[in-house]
Image: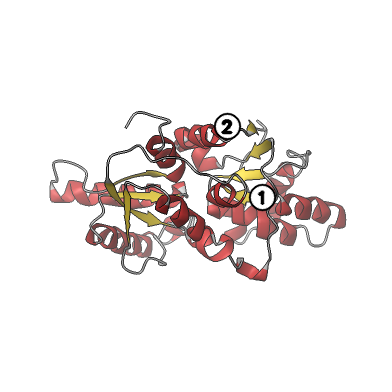
Amino acid sequence: MEQPHGLSRDYPPKPENVYLFATCLVDQFAPEAGLDTIRLLEREGIAVHFPERQTCCGQPAYTSGYPDEARAVARLQLDLFPRLWPVVVPSGSCAAMLRHHYPKLFANDPPLRAKAEDLSRRVFELTEFLVHVAGFRQQDIGEPCTVALHTSCHARREMGSHETSAALLASLDQVEVVQQARVEECCGFGGTFAIRHPDISEAIVTDKVTSLKDSGARRVVSADCGCLFNILGSAARLDEIAGAPAPTLEGEHIASFLWRRTGGAEQ
């Protein structure tokens, strides 16, 4: 697979140990996705280490035009992963920040730039890691179902992990993946974009929810919690307005979906 940004990627053999960078949204709002990430990796025979002092990756400040504040947050992360183990991130957006933008943040500080570059080489988005490093092969024991995949803009354009998310879903025999119209379009979240431009964000996510429903799927799977929360929150609001007796669109993080479908949790 050709890597975004023209960067080639050398994938290591499956390691015995990895670090987990959980992300703020997983830590604060979707801990089960983080736990299921750990369960998936441990089932592959990999020990998962979670540095407890990790915080935000700094992306909200960075994309809002506050590089100094982003640097202050990012600097706190640089020394949390001292061993030369892969750093697995259950978010394409945060993984892209760590891999592609940390070296830019510290471009004028050689010692910190060296640390950022070392870290960036070891960062893997979760589905990328499962496909290219862990060699994920698990039997699908779930009932037949139809889902749509939504991939965040950063995951698609900076990480290329839309391909590995799709490959994992395609490996599940009982799962039919349907394609939404304009699959590459944003969900409207964009972190602080949704706060600064709520009307535009609402229009974009309404479009996205409509496309997902029109695909025939009643469940959406994503490797990025921000997108997932935005889409499901909009869908729930539209259901409330329409007086729907039950949710018309449900969803979950791909880690939880994979764990559940392959026997790790009750169906």
Residue 216 in view here: yes
Q: Which mark is residue 96?
A: none
In the displayed structure, does residue 122 sit left or right of residue 135? right
Viewer-side residue, 131 vs 245: 131
Q: Position of residue 84 (x, y in %)?
A: 77, 42
Q: Select label 2 or label 1 by which is in front.
A: 2
Residue 61 in view here: no
Identify the residue under disc 2. Answer: 42
Q: Which three-letter amino acid code belongs to the residue tagged 2? A: Glu
Above or below — where is 248 with respect to 106? Answer: above
Above or below — where is 125 with respect to 260? Answer: below
Write down the quadrant of residue 47 in the picture.
top right
Identify the residue under disc 1. Answer: 123
Task: Name the secondary structure under disc 1.
Answer: strand
Residue occupying the point 52% across, 32% down = 39
Q: Which three-letter amino acid code belongs to the residue tagged 1? A: Val
- How busy is the neighbourhood of tag 1: few (under 14 within 10 Å), some, or many (20 plus)? many
Residue occupying the point 40% across, 67% down = 185
Viewer-side residue, 218 vs 63: 218
- How busy is the neighbourhood of tag 2: few (under 14 within 10 Å), some, or many (20 plus)? some
Q: Position of residue 135 (x, y in %)?
A: 57, 46
In the displayed structure, does residue 207 sit left or right of residue 86? left
Q: Position of residue 180 (x, y in %)?
A: 31, 63
2 and 1 marks in contact (CB < 8 Å): no
Viewer-side residue, 207 vs 99: 99
Farthest top residue in view = 266
Q: Quadrant of the C terminus?
A: top left
Q: Quadrant of the N terminus?
A: bottom right
Residue occupying the point 62% across, 44% down = 88
Above or below — where is 10 with respect to 250? Answer: below
Viewer-side residue, 76 vs 91: 91
